[in-house]
Each structure stands twice: as C-alpha cells, then as structure tokens.
C-alpha cells in the first residue's frame, strides 16, 4: 500500500485507464494482451495503473491474467449505475439543469439512467411551432402512439386522424385545459376517434409540470418546462429500448390517477 493513501474515488475516477480496466474485468478475467488491445494502450503505460489497482486490492494477477477481487467486484457493481447517471447529465446538463424534473416519480428518478442515449434538439425559431418531424414520421410506422400533454398543438385535430387512418392506436392523457379545448372546439373530431375505438383518452386532474411526453415504437419525446415554468421550444429525443420502457412506465404512472374519458362524458 502506498505511504500516502488516496481515496478509492481518486483511484477509480482520476484515471481513465484504471476505470476502464475495472469495467473490462467486470466481464471476467482478461489477459494483459486483451487489456492492451481493448484499452488501445501500451504495456508501459498500463502497468503502473495495474499496480495501483493491485495495491488497493481491487484486482489480482493470476499468471498473465487479471481479475477483480471481492472488493473490486463490490466497487465495480456500484460504479456502473453511477457512470450511467453521469452519462445522462454529462452532455445534457445545460438542458436538464434548467428544466423542471419534479414531474418524474421517485421510482423513475432511480431509473433515469435509461435516458443516457437521448439527444437535445435545438430548434431554429422558424421551426419552433412545428411538431417534431422525426416523432411524427416514426409514429406512422408504429402500432401505437402514447401522449401525455398539458399543451394543445393546433395540428392535433388533423395529425391524429391521419395517424388513425394508418392503423395507429392513440393513447392520450391530457390536462383539464387541453380536454376543454378538445370538447369545445374539436368535439366532432375527437368524439369520433373515441367512438370507433381508435383513441383511448384520459384526463389528468392536476398540474403536469411539463409540456409533452410522447412515444411510439421508435422514439421518446420529452418537451419540458423551464425551472421558471416557461415554455421552451427545445426538447429531448430518445431512441433506445431502455428510454422507450422508461416512457411507458411514466405514461402508466399518469394513467393510474387519470379519469378515462368515454364518448358518453366527452
């Protein structure tokens, strides 16, 4: 053990080589040549880092192979969720740090690492009032489209029937404000979608805390409010299966406390 003891956080995260070595060994023992190739480094550069990991009882050498110790296993098991969360915020901290996240229920806050592959979409002003075209395009290729919204877009009465014509089933949760617009200004359109079974509509009784959360078979869209409650034209778009699963769980959370809107009460 070195005479000046560093913290394990320093040992793990102050060196990309040490961190990545631990992550590689999480998959199982590796020979030196495999480590060198995977890390794209030289023996001269890696050996000092290997020695440090050995000094702190994180890895053991068995012949020409290295493996995690029990301590190394415990530490690495906790590293991976932390690194996943860091990845969520690392490149999107300016967006997520300035937008309200209070709408996320605690059980999904714990799963926020599922959003690590999302990208921020910054729109030029002339396109600020358009629906996200990537989401619209992939919805026409999907079996279902799920929406939770506190915002009524003027294209909804036209784009939703077009989706239904392509055999897309709609599942929509709306705020009381949006429901009132649908009832009073576009009653015939939406009651027709409910009547023919193309639209499952629900009303959420409280403030939502965001503009729109929507997902289809391919994309998850998150259009959030700023921390000051202001509308923002920029949004996040995700395409991983993990993100779609996260979006589905969020939809079910809001659906659970929402009221189904049937043709009789629309």
Image: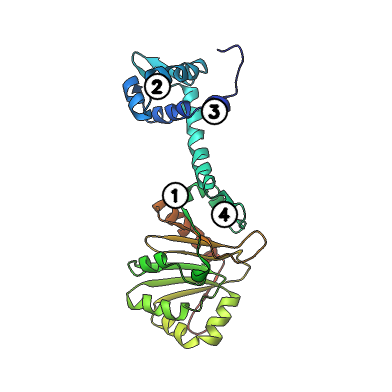
Residue 177 location in percent, x, y? 60, 77
Determine the CA span between mark 4 and mark 3: 27 Å
Determine the CA span between mark 2 and mark 3: 20 Å
Q: Count numbered badges in the picture.
A: 4
Query: Where 205 falls versus 51 (above or below)?
Result: below
Determine which of the numbered discs, if any, sits on residue 95 in the image: 4
Query: For the residues carrying marks 1 and 3, which lies nearer the camera in this image?
Result: 3
Determine the CA span between mark 1 and mark 3: 24 Å
Q: Name the element at disc 2.
A: strand
- Lower sequence index among marks 4 and 3: 3
Residue 44 location in percent, x, y? 40, 17
Query: For the residues carrying marks 4 and 2, which lies nearer the camera in this image?
Result: 4
- Lower sequence index among marks 4 and 2: 2
Local packing at callout 2 (Cα closer than 10 Å; few below 14, some 14-19, many 20+) is: many
Query: Where 242 falls versus 170 (above or below)?
Result: above
- In-front residue for pair 193/83: 83
- Lower sequence index among marks 1 and 2: 2
Determine which of the numbered discs, if any, sits on residue 14 in the image: 3
- In-front residue for pair 93/174: 93
Q: Residue furthest right?
A: 228
Dot 1 corresponds to which residue?
117
At x 53%, y 52%, the residue is 108
Q: Marks 1 and 2: CB-CB under 8 Å?
A: no
Query: For the residues carrying marks 4 and 1, which lies nearer the camera in this image?
Result: 4
Local packing at callout 1 (Cα closer than 10 Å; few below 14, some 14-19, many 20+) is: some
- The answer to whether residue 252 is visible is no
């Amino acid at each position: 053990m070195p005479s000046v003891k560093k913290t394990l956080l320093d040992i793990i995260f102050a060196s990309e080589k040490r961190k990545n070595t631990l992550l590689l060994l999480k998959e199982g023992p590796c020979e030196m040549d495999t480590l060198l190739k995977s890390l794209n480094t030289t023996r001269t550069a890696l050996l000092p880092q290997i020695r440090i990991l050995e000094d702190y009882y994180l890895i053991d050498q068995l012949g020409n192979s290295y493996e995690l110790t029990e301590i190394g296993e415990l530490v690495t098991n906790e590293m991976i969720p932390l690194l996943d969360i860091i990845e969520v915020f690392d490149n999107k901290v300016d967006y997520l740090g300035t937008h309200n996240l209070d709408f996320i229920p605690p059980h999904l806050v714990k799963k926020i690492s599922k959003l690590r592959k999302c990208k921020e979409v910054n729109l030029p002003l002339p396109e600020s009032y358009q629906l996200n075209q990537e989401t619209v395009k992939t919805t026409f290729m999907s079996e279902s489209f799920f929406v939770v919204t506190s915002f009524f877009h003027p294209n909804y009465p036209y784009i939703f029937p077009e989706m239904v014509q392509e055999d897309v089933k709609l599942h929509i949760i709306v705020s009381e404000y949006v429901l009132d617009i649908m009832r009073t200004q576009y009653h015939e359109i939406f009651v027709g979608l409910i009547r023919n079974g193309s639209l499952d509509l629900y009303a959420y009784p409280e403030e939502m805390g965001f503009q729109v959360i929507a997902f289809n078979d391919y994309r998850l869209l998150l259009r959030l409010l700023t921390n000051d409650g202001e509308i923002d034209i920029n949004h996040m778009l995700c395409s991983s299966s993990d993100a779609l699963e996260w979006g589905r769980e969020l939809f079910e959370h809001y659906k659970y406390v929402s009221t189904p809107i049937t043709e009789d009460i629309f």
